[in-house]
Structure formats: C-alpha cells, structure tokens
Image (tube, rainbow, N blue to C red):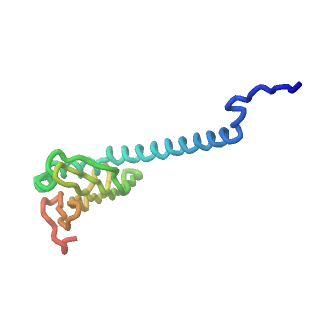
C-alpha cells in the first residue's frame, strides 16, 4: 500500500524564491521612501528660505511677469541650486521653475547673506522658450549684452 504524503501549502512549495524576492522588495521600498523623504526635505528647506520667498514674491508682483504668465503664478517642480549658510554668512544660487495659465518660466536668484540680511546680485525671470530675461530687482527687460 502506498503511503500518501500530505500536499504542501504555497509557502512550503515556494519559500526558496519568495523569501529573497520579498526581502529585496522591502529593501527597494525602503530606499525609495528614503530618497523621497530626502527630496521633499530639501525642497521644503528651499521653499522656506528667504531668497526663494523674496524671488517668488517679486515675480508674483511684477506686472511684466504677470503679463507673460498670467495669474496665479505658482511654482512647479523642484527648485535647483544651493543655499549655503555658516555663521550668519552665506550664498544662494537658485533656479525656481514657475508657471501661470499662459506660459511657464524660471526665476534665477543669486545672493549673499551677511548677518541677518540678504543682498541680491540678481533676481531674474526668464520665459520658457524665449531669450527674454527680466530683471526683477530693477524692473527692466535685459538685453543680450546686459548679461
């Protein structure tokens, strides 16, 4: 008489490939969560910085920018660049993507911090796909030779 062995369940049949696959999947998910947290954290730091806020406010209040983009003017995507501050001294070099109902563009900011105040070398707005650059500090359109 043949002895019939009990049928193995799914885990007993597949543990040799399911365990490493599940472990790798968990590692990939943890790395993705870490990268996402890092990107959103850096983005939040940029958005809270004075150079970012000053540049965005100047663009949102500029009649020239409003004419090009329409209202409301909002940020889109993530700012690029860097902000470095040590002992109340620092620099900011940012590129902030913005959009409106009509078009999109980017705000370019370069400034230095001394003590509690920032001094900006430039805050400029450039319309996407155009060579037009507008100086948001002096409220004037820049010509190619002004760069």
Residue farthest front in this picture: 1
From the top left corner, tell me how far across and down residue 18 is, in percent: 65, 39
Front residue of 56 and 78:
78
User: Which of the 4 image quadrants contains residue 106?
Assistant: bottom left
From the top left corner, tell me how far across and down residue 77 is, in percent: 32, 50
Residue farthest bottom in this picture: 145
* In this view, 2 is above or below 54: above
- Horizontal arrangement in the rendering, residue 67 relative to residue 121 (left or right): left
Front residue of 113 and 11:
11
* In this view, 139 is above or below 47: below
* In this view, 41 is above or below 10: below
Image quadrant occupied by the N terminus: top right
Residue farthest right in this picture: 1
* In this view, 115 is above or below 134: above
Image quadrant occupied by the C terminus: bottom left
Q: How many marks?
A: 0
Give me the residue at 25% from left, 52% from top: 98
Front residue of 65 and 18:
18
Give me the residue at 29% from left, 54% from top: 96
Give me the residue at 62% from left, 39% from top: 22
- Horizontal arrangement in the rendering, residue 32 relative to residue 66 (left or right): right
Give me the residue at 14% from left, 50% from top: 70
- Horizontal arrangement in the rendering, residue 42 relative to residue 33 (left or right): left
From the top left corner, tell me how far across and down residue 118 is, in percent: 28, 53
Front residue of 22 and 99:
22
């Amino acid at each position: 008489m043949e002895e019939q062995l009990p049928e193995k369940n799914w885990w007993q049949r597949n543990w040799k490939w399911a365990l490493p696959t599940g472990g790798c999947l968990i590692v990939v998910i943890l790395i993705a969560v870490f990268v996402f947290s890092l990107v959103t954290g850096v983005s939040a730091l940029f958005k809270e910085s004075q150079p970012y806020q000053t540049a965005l406010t100047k663009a949102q209040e500029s009649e020239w920018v409003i004419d090009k983009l329409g209202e409301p003017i909002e940020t889109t995507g993530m700012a690029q660049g860097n902000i470095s501050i040590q002992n109340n001294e620092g620099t900011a070099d940012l590129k902030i993507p913005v959009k409106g109902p009509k078009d999109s563009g980017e705000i370019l900011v370069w400034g230095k911090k001394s003590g509690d105040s920032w001094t900006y070398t430039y805050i400029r707005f450039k319309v996407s796909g155009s060579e037009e650059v507008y100086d948001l500090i002096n409220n004037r359109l820049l010509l190619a030779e002004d760069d």
